Amino acid sequence: MKTRSLFGKKYIDLQIRELEIPALMPDQVLVKVHACGVCGTDLNFVRDWSGDYQGLGHEIAGEIIDTGSIVSTLKKGDKVVVEDCTMCGKCADCKAGHPEFCRNMYNMNGFPGMGEYIVVNAAACTVFDGLDYIHAALTEPLAVAYNAVLTADIPLGGSVVVLGPGAIGLLCAKVARLRGAGYVAVVGRNDSTPEQQARLELAVKLGCDQVIVSASESVRDTVLKRFPQGVDRVIVTSPPKSMYDAFDIIRYGGGIIYLGLSFKEGENIIDFDVNRAIFNKITLKPSFAEPAINFPAALDLIKNGLIPAELFQTHTCSFDDCHELFEATLKGTVPVIKPVFCP
């Protein structure tokens, strides 16, 4: 049995490869992919990555087609969301109660999520019902945002500014509100394209107190006008250079949580005033959701309507038209929040 899978690199250079599906190991399952969200990382790969082709997609919702001989928790026909990196549960860090430090993880065995089928360890799957596959595919990015907000440890009623109005940033803003933030703002670079406008409009729909467009107003001046001492937390989901704005608006003793990446050469490097951070007691915390955690909680948020998945997953594509949608998303010519690949 074979599967078609999508790979890509710089300049939206896409390849559809036919991969052989191996015989299942006793603890593995075969999943038919019904929906796979297009992550900002995938778009970064097809815009900036100059190395070898990368397998695309890791925000997966699908159906169990077959199970290994010792799998007892899953059965054929189960609807599941799939973790791209799953804690092993056996290493010293996992045993010590720190699965976030696991380095012996189960992975996707070289199968891109943007494909027809994938083979994964059964432990990577969480069963769901009451949702369609497309909405369930929001689980992974929501879990990433949830992890970032938990890492931020926002004080009850505290002030939060989220830098970056992409899907992860918007999800962070919504989860921050659900976690008790008293003030939430989202900062976007511009509002000149349909995509940028749609994302800033969604920030308002999600209940954000303020939307700041950095191309037309100073982030520092706008935030400090309302909070002269700075805000309690800044969550950086935009590229690393956005950290400069974070340092400008964080209060004494505040915390900056950062998860925005860049694969463009040199753009992952910023200047950092260590003295300033020390003297102002600023806490810096990276947030990297690997291994994947909080999938059950994220699923419940979607299923219970606390996260309106239908407002995020605005466009779908397949093998036939993914190049067109990727290009339009990167150019900002369509009002897309979260594209979803449906093979």
Image (spheres, rainbow, N blue to C red):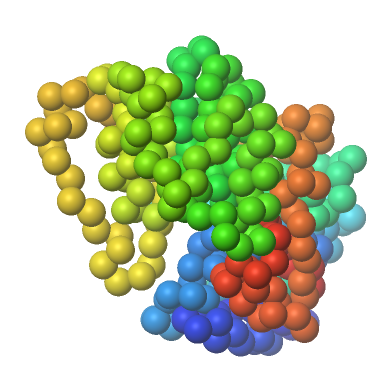
Image point (34%, 53%), residue name:
240
Q: Nearer the viewer, residue 231 or 24?
A: 231
Q: Is residue 226 visible?
A: yes
Against 276, is 252 above or below? above
Q: Nearer the viewer, residue 299 or 101?
A: 299
Whole-percent x and y of residue 335? 70, 60
Q: Quadrant of the N terminus?
A: bottom right
Whole-percent x and y of residue 70? 72, 52
Q: Number of labelled discs? A: 0
Whole-percent x and y of residue 274? 13, 38
Against 224, is 85 above or below? below
Image point (39%, 39%), residue name:
219
Q: Nearer the viewer, residue 178 or 120?
A: 178
Image point (50%, 83%), residue name:
11
Against 257, is 106 above or below? below
Q: Residue furthest left?
A: 275
Whole-percent x and y of residue 103? 40, 50
Q: Quadrant of the C terminus?
A: bottom right
Q: Is residue 95 visible?
A: no
Q: Residue furthest top?
A: 156
- Is 220 placed left or right of 134 in the picture? left
Image point (68%, 43%), residue name:
202
